[in-house]
Amino acid sequence: MKLKAIGLVNSPFKLKKGSPHQGRFSNEFSTITIYKEYEEALEGIENFSNLIIIYWMDRAGPASLRVVPHGKTEKRGLFSTRAPVRPNPIGLCMVKLVKREDNILTVKWLDALDQSPVLDIKPFVPDIDCL
Ligand SMILES: C[S@@+](CC[C@H](N)C(=O)[O-])C[C@H]1O[C@@H](n2cnc3c(N)ncnc32)[C@H](O)[C@@H]1O
């Protein structure tokens, strides 16, 4: 498998400490700068109010198969949690698209730390993504 970063996050969250455990619990704005070679792929994205951002949690610690989830006291299997310490530290966030200016997206509800690499963007489509 080969992954390529398609862009980079600029976020007010510089450190893990103090960052929201899920972006939905914060109203801070972040930007995602899509690299110029992928800018064409943004065509039409303004038609979606919400996006799914897939990013790489590049500063996550080593994978741990059992973790204590946020706000809990007992360990559980990693795959029953959203903890960052995963074999593949992929973060997934549904965000609100505030605006697009060329290759820069301004979003709300993203919990990625500043300078996190972005792997993919998909539109949030209620008919598909809501149960
Ligand atoms: C619990 S994870 C959830 C991530 C995503 N919303 C998900 O559910 O996959 C969110 C935490 O990951 C941490 N985080 C965000 N970006 C990171 C990065 N680039 N490297 C390491 N940790 C990161 C932040 O501290 C944040 O509080």
Image: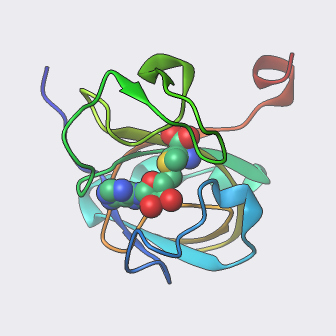
Q: Foreground residue, 98 or 47?
A: 98
Q: Foreground residue, 15 or 98?
A: 15
Q: Foreground residue, 24 or 40?
A: 24
Q: Quadrant of residue 69?
A: top right
- As displayed, is residue 84 above or below residue 19? above
**What's the residue at 44%, 73% (across, down)?**
17
- As displayed, is residue 105 above or below residue 94? below
**What's the residue at 32%, 39% (across, down)?**
85
Residue positioned most to the front: 73
- As displayed, is residue 13 above or below residue 50? below
**What's the residue at 30%, 71% (across, down)?**
115
Q: How is the image coloured?
A: rainbow
**Exactly how many numbered labels are in the figure?**
0
Q: In which quarter of the image is the N terminus?
A: top left
Q: Foreground residue, 125 or 57?
A: 57
**What's the residue at 53%, 35% (across, down)?**
82
The picture places residue 35, in percent across and down from the top left corner, at: 28, 63
Does residue 128 show up? yes
Does residue 39 show up? no
48 lies left or right of 2: right
The picture places residue 10, in percent across and down from the top left corner, at: 41, 77
Q: In which quarter of the image is the C terminus?
A: top right
101 lies left or right of 7: right
The picture places residue 59, in percent across and down from the top left corner, at: 24, 58
The picture places residue 51, in percent across and down from the top left corner, at: 65, 47
